[in-house]
Amino acid sequence: MTAGGDAAEDDLRGRTVAVLGLGLMGRPMSRRLAQAGVRVRAWNRSATEPLDVEGWSLHPSAEEACTPASGVDTVITVLPGLAPVAQVVEPLLRPGLVVVVMGTTSPTDLRAWAARAAERGAVVVDAPVSGGDVGAATGRLSVMVGGDDDAVARLMPLFGVLGTVVRHLGPVGSGQVAKACNQAVVATTLAVLGEAVVLAERSGLDVEALLDVLGSGLAGSRALEVKREKLLSRDFTPGGLSVNQHHDLGFALASAREVGVATPVTAAVDQLFGAMRWTGRGGDDHSGVLQVLEDLSGGARG
């Protein structure tokens, strides 16, 4: 969903944006923007290596990355939750600044913070993503956007660099509601894949063959495609952190309660990901939820 042709390319090459947060998602997203011709002024809370990409620069503070003299009119935050966003960005707010919140947070809290930012003349757009670090690196993210029509229209060329599916879903906070729905589906899919793997193993099936069958039928999913090797190898080096998955399920449950929607499946899966954290596995990839299912089934078997 990008603007077409040379006009979009010229628009990107004339842009200067700040990217705050260079973790699993922020770093590859900032790289893609710079490679598309956007001047990227980056900052990270902890030490990080600079990228050897033309137009990309690393700065020692968020204030320096976003200084008005730099021409930055858009700040993209890729930070875990609204609290760090508010802490880092509130000193930077000024009339005309557009703040894009790409991390996952509470829709209700985000709307309240956006209202406070508007009092200082800034505009907040939420644009959480799905697709993990692989999608961030390849530009295959799904981008769920909420915000003012004019601000979103201005941001669409940037979002088009990051994702293959970009949808404007309504006013600010709408993207976070969509992300809550996404996270409920992802978590549930990973949990039931874990159940399937444990059941297959205990029944003497070849798990690799089982995943071939599942992937080629109606049970196939993007989650299975991306996490297949982790399920087979038990290498749960994170692409998506279990602790973040649990946080996001909390936002989904709170959003459902706010509008009076029953979510019994999400509530059960929330308990499984809570157990990931409580058993010291919060730093594992979210596909590692199968370890909790093994625990419930008497432990892992060789």
Image (cartoon, rainbow, N blue to C red):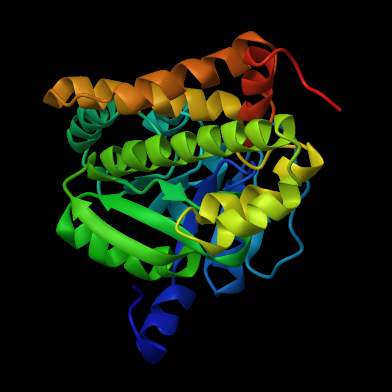
Front position in the image: 124 or 258: 258
Residue 181 pos. (x, y %): 32, 39
Residue 139 pos. (x, y %): 54, 66
Tell me which residue sits at (31%, 49%) in the image. 97
Q: How many marks do you count on the picture? A: 0
Q: Which residue lies furthest to the right in this view?
A: 302
Instruction: Say left or right for 21 vs 144.
Output: right
Instruction: Say left or right for 250 vs 130.
Output: left
Tell me where residue 35 sits by quadrant: bottom right
Tell me which residue sits at (52%, 56%) in the image. 222
When the figure is inspected, residue 217 is found, relative to residue 92, above or below; the finding is below
Front position in the image: 223 or 249: 223
Tell me which residue sits at (36%, 20%) in the image. 267
Q: Is residue 160 shown to the viewer in this render?
A: yes
Q: Residue furthest left?
A: 260
Of the 4 image quadrants, the one containing the C terminus is: top right
Q: Which residue lies furthest to the front in this view?
A: 203
Of the 4 image quadrants, the one containing the N terminus is: bottom left
Front position in the image: 54 or 272: 272
Q: Is residue 45 shown to the viewer in this render?
A: no
Tell me where residue 8 sits by quadrant: bottom left
Q: Residue furthest top?
A: 278
Front position in the image: 86 or 298: 298
When the figure is inspected, residue 112 is found, relative to residue 67, above or below; the finding is above
Residue 186 pos. (x, y %): 46, 41
Tell me where residue 62 sits by quadrant: top right
Tell me which residue sits at (74%, 51%) in the image. 208
Residue 58 pos. (x, y %): 67, 50
